[in-house]
Amino acid sequence: AMGAIVAPSPPAGKRFDGMTITIINRSQILGRPLASLLSNDGATVYSIDKDSILLYNNRRVKRLLNSFSSSSSSPKDMEFCVREAQVIITAVPSSTFQLPATWIQSGSTVINVASQPNIDEEELRSVVPEVFYVPQIGRVTVSLLEHNLVTLHRRHHDCKNDFNEKDLTY
């Protein structure tokens, strides 16, 4: 009876099929691994950094833009990538970076993981109807991510006695 109520989730590798996600800031810590993870699960991912745009698609990476200079022959720029995305993840650690709300399509999800706001929330809510906005990832989320990372490491290396979980601080 429960199977009729709860739809089964798509299999791994297909959970984000048909979805376009743009990540702004391709750091080694968050942006690059997140782009690979989402792409490996079926998403088309635009990964934007200060000097280039990479497209992660079908477990492959393609450089779309080598720089943001006006001499570039690529038709794809940051505005194009944001306008195409149903999910936008901003992670720019700068108070001067502001993503224009007018680039975001209605019904999108915008997640800011930077310590500073990368978009003006008031403008976003007034310009984009039906947007789901996560203004900041909190300390509890970061702690749980760190805990999961340690757990993953332990399971991968089967090193159950390397440290005591009670020594971890949250």
Image (spheres, rainbow, N blue to C red):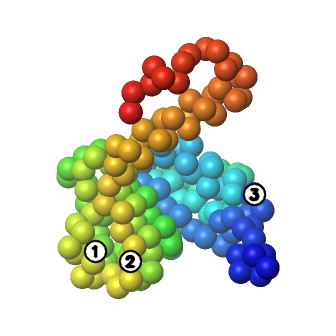
Other-residue count near label 1 (Cα within 10 Å), few / some / many at <14 / 14–19 / ≥20: many
Amino acid type, label 3: Ala
Image quadrant assignment for residue 151: top right
SS at mark 3?
loop
User: Disc 3 to disc 2, how far (Cα)?
Assistant: 27 Å
Label 3 crowd (10 A; few <14 / some 14-19 / many >=20): few
Secondary structure under tag 2 reads loop
For mark 1, give the secondary structure.
Answer: helix
Tell me if 105 is positioned left or right of 123 in this view: right
User: Would you say the residues marked 2 and 1 are in contact, meaning their CB atoms lie under 8 Å apart?
Assistant: yes
Residue under numbered circle 3: 12
Q: Which residue is mark 1?
A: 124
Q: Locate residue 17, reporting x and y percent.
A: 69, 69
> Up-down: is 77 above or below 141?
below
**Which residue appears at 63% of the width and 49% of the height?**
37
Q: Residue at x 71, y 23 (%)?
A: 157
Mark nearer the N terminus (1 vs 3): 3
75 to the left or right of 14: left
Marks 2/1: CA–CA distance: 8 Å
* Amino acid tagged 2: Val
Q: How many marks?
A: 3
